[in-house]
Every structure is written in C-alpha cells, then in structure tokens.
C-alpha cells in the first residue's frame, strides 16, 4: 500500500525545487480531496443535492491539478488549487451576511501558506495582493454598505493586514527554504562529483605513479634548461639595465674640451657612482677641461645629492677638469642654504651662461672686457683655490 502511494506521489520534474513544490501540491490536493468527500457527505445529509456543487466542482479542479503536478508543472497546478480555493471563499463571502463575510479574510491566510509551499517567492506576492484585492472587491460588491458597519470594517481591516503580514513572513520563509534547497543540492552534487573523482583517482593511481615518474624526469630536464635560459635572460637584463643607466646619465660633448652632463630624476647611490665613472672616463678620453653639470631636472637636492656632485667635481679636478654647476632653481638654493650645504663649486644660473664662463675667463686672461648684461659668475671659496 505504501509503495503504491509513493508511486502515485511522484513527479517527472528534474529540478529539485520544482520536485519539492510539485510534491507539496499533490499532498495538499490529496488532503483537500478527503476534505471534499467529508463536506459532500455532510452537505448531502444537511442541505440535499444543492450543496454538492462546490465540493464536486473543486474536486474536479483538484484532480486536474494533481495530474499537472505529476507531469512536473508545479506552478500551474498550484495556481489551479489556489484559484479554486479562492473562488469557493468568494462564493462564501457573497452568500453570508456582512458580519460573517468579513471573517472570511482570516481563513484566506491558508491560501498564503499554500502559495508559500507551492509557488516561487515572486509568485507568492502576486497571490498575496490578489487575495486581498479579491476579498475587498467581492465584499464591496456583495455588501455595498459594509464599510459603514464598524464591526465589519474592523474585521476587514484586521484580516487584510493579517494577509499582508502572513504573505511577508511566508515570502521570507520561502526564500530561505529555496536557498537552503539550492545549497543542499549543490553540496550533494559536489559530494557526488568528488566521490566519483576519488574512485577514478584510486583506480588510476598505480598507472599515474609510473607516468608521474617519467614526467618528473622530463620536468627536471626542462627545469634545468629553463634555469640556464633564466640565467642568460638575467645576464641580458643586467646588461640592459647597465645600458639604461648609462643612457640616463649622458655626457654630451658640446665643443672642444667641454662636455655637458644633464641630470634628471632622483640621484641615488648607484647613479651617483655611475655619474662619477662616466665623467672621469670622458675627461680622460677626450681631454676635457670643462665639465658642466646641469641639475635643472633634479627635483630634490639634499645632502646625498650634494655630496655626489662634490665627489664628481673633486675627482674631475684631480684630472685637470673644472666643474661648473648650472640649473640651480630658487627653491633648491634655499634648501641648500637651509641645510648648511657648502658645495664649493663654480655655478651659473643657466646652461648658456655656464657655457660662456670659460670664454669670459679666457677674455679676462687676455685683457678683454665682459659684455654688458651677462650674468656674473659666482665663485665660492674652496680649500684648493
């Protein structure tokens, strides 16, 4: 008997949520069919054949909904049940006095509960507002003056609010139930997939051990080749970095015996050492007697930068080259004074004036006059001048 009942209570739906709702519809329909049989018997005994119409008509609707639920059409079956239930309730509203009709709204909460078990959360709101609207509209049509009756008005308002509250609570419960079912379904599918993968892994373990041994040997050889390639790439990158560093500190010959070294960006210890090395190499190779350091592009001149410039100038002086510092901006000059830094270098405001300084010196030595409007070079006393 139980097996036959279980066979009847089955659905063709494949989705877990649809299966749950279809099963709920079929169980509700089974209970309503039993209730209709009892109502039919009581009606025949008390009122005769005229009271049998509603139980018989609703039973026919329920049987059709049951067939649809078995086919997997849970939502359609649920709507048939809800509409049949609602139609019966509205008939009761029209056939009873206003005092009793206003109490029907309390019984309509059962429709909201049924909808929460058999419909989606979105459809539940449609049922809630549809039930409230149908109840109020039927009550107004069947009993036009019901709003002027205080007890009827109070029951109507209370039952309508109750329907909305039950609808909201049922909506929350339906959402939570649907989420829990989806999570459980996903967890079950994941567990089944992991179990199948584990069984397959155990079956192929011995074969894969041999394959992995061979693969590891090939991987080791590939890693060794990759290590060698990385070493070559590292050497090339270091060479490229050296080239970039040299390009970032260009030493530009501008005329016989004079070079310009334009500096830009931050000067760290590596660039400072490279600066000194590049300047000394060019001084030696080209027999330079004047080196012009242009710091226009250096954003910050602090103690470290100043020491780097002084070291470069001192080293160049030892090789017979004079160093001229140009491009000192007002804020840089204020910073140097504030830090108490004494450069001990010959300076000029611009690169053009720095290039003209050696020419002026030559003119002075030859007795010539300096052209008017030229900026006078500033000298700072040093220990070796």
Image (cartoon, rainbow, N blue to C red):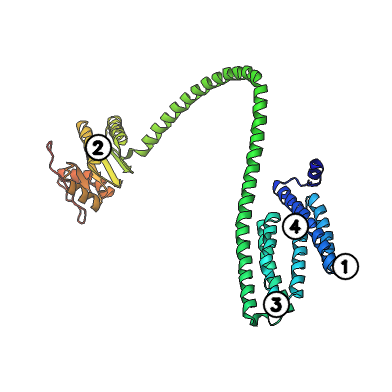
Residue at (63%, 73%) from the top-left corner? 155
Given this view, does label 3 or label 1 mark the residue nearer the observer? 1
Residue at (74%, 49%) from the top-left corner? 23
Residue 115 screen position, x and y as percent: 69, 58
Of callouts 4 and 3, which one flags the residue occurring earlier in the amino acid sequence? 4
Disc marking residue 122: none
Residue at (60%, 64%) from the top-left corner? 165
Assign a secondary structure to mark 3: helix
Disc marking residue 308: 2
Q: Label 4 belongs to which residue?
A: 78
Assign a secondary structure to mark 1: helix
* Spatial CA span between label 4 and label 1: 29 Å
The 10 Å Cα crowd at callout 3, few under 14, some 14 to 19, many 20 or more, is: many
Of callouts 3 and 1, which one flags the residue occurring earlier in the amino acid sequence? 1
Assign a secondary structure to mark 2: helix
Residue 372 figure quarter: bottom left
344 left or right of 15 in image? left
Q: Label 1 belongs to which residue?
A: 49
Q: Is residue 110 above or below residue 11?
A: below
* Spatial CA span between label 2 and label 4: 87 Å
Of callouts 1 and 2, which one flags the residue occurring earlier in the amino acid sequence? 1
* Spatial CA span between label 4 and label 3: 30 Å
Given this view, does label 4 or label 1 mark the residue nearer the observer? 1
Given this view, does label 4 or label 3 mark the residue nearer the observer? 3
Q: Quadrant of the N terminus?
A: top right
Front one among 193 and 361: 193
Given this view, does label 2 or label 4 mark the residue nearer the observer? 4
Of callouts 3 and 2, which one flags the residue occurring earlier in the amino acid sequence? 3
């Amino acid at each position: 008997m139980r097996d036959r009942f279980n066979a009847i209570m089955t659905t063709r739906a494949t989705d877990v949520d649809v299966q749950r709702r279809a099963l709920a519809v079929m169980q509700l329909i089974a209970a309503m069919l039993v209730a209709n049989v009892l109502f039919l018997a009581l009606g025949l005994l008390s009122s005769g054949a005229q009271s049998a119409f509603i139980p018989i008509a609703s039973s026919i609707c329920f049987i059709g909904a049951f067939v649809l639920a078995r086919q997997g059409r849970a939502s359609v079956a649920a709507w048939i049940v809800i509409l049949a239930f609602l139609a019966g309730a509205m008939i009761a509203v029209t056939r009873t006095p206003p005092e009793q009709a206003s109490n029907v709204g309390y019984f309509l909460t059962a429709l909201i509960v049924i909808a929460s078990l058999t419909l989606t959360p979105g459809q539940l709101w449609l049922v809630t507002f549809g039930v409230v609207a149908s109840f109020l509209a039927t009550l107004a049509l069947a009993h036009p003056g019901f709003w002027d009756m205080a007890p009827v008005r109070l029951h109507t308002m209370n039952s309508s609010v109750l329907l909305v509250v039950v609808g909201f609570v049922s909506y929350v419960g339906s959402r939570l139930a649907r989420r829990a079912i989806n999570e459980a379904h996903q967890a079950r599918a994941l567990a089944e997939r992991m179990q199948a993968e584990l069984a397959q892994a155990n079956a192929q373990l011995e074969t894969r051990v041999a394959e992995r041994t061979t693969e590891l040997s090939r991987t080791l050889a590939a890693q060794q080749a990759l290590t060698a390639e990385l070493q070559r790439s590292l050497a090339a990158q270091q060479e490229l970095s050296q080239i970039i560093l040299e390009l970032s500190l260009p030493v530009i010959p501008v005329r016989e015996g004079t070079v310009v070294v334009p500096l830009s960006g931050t000067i760290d210890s590596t660039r400072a050492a490279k600066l000194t090395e590049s300047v000394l190499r060019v001084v030696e190779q080209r027999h330079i007697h004047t080196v012009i350091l242009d710091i226009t592009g250096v954003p910050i001149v602090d103690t470290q930068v100043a020491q780097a410039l002084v070291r470069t100038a001192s080293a160049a002086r030892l090789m017979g080259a004079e160093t001229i510092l140009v491009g000192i901006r007002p804020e840089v000059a204020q910073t140097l004074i504030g830090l108490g830094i004494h450069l001990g270098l010959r300076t000029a405001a611009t690169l053009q004036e720095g290039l003209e300084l050696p020419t002026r010196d030559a003119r002075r030595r030859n007795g010539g006059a300096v052209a008017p409007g030229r900026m006078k070079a500033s000298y700072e006393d040093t220990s070796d001048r």
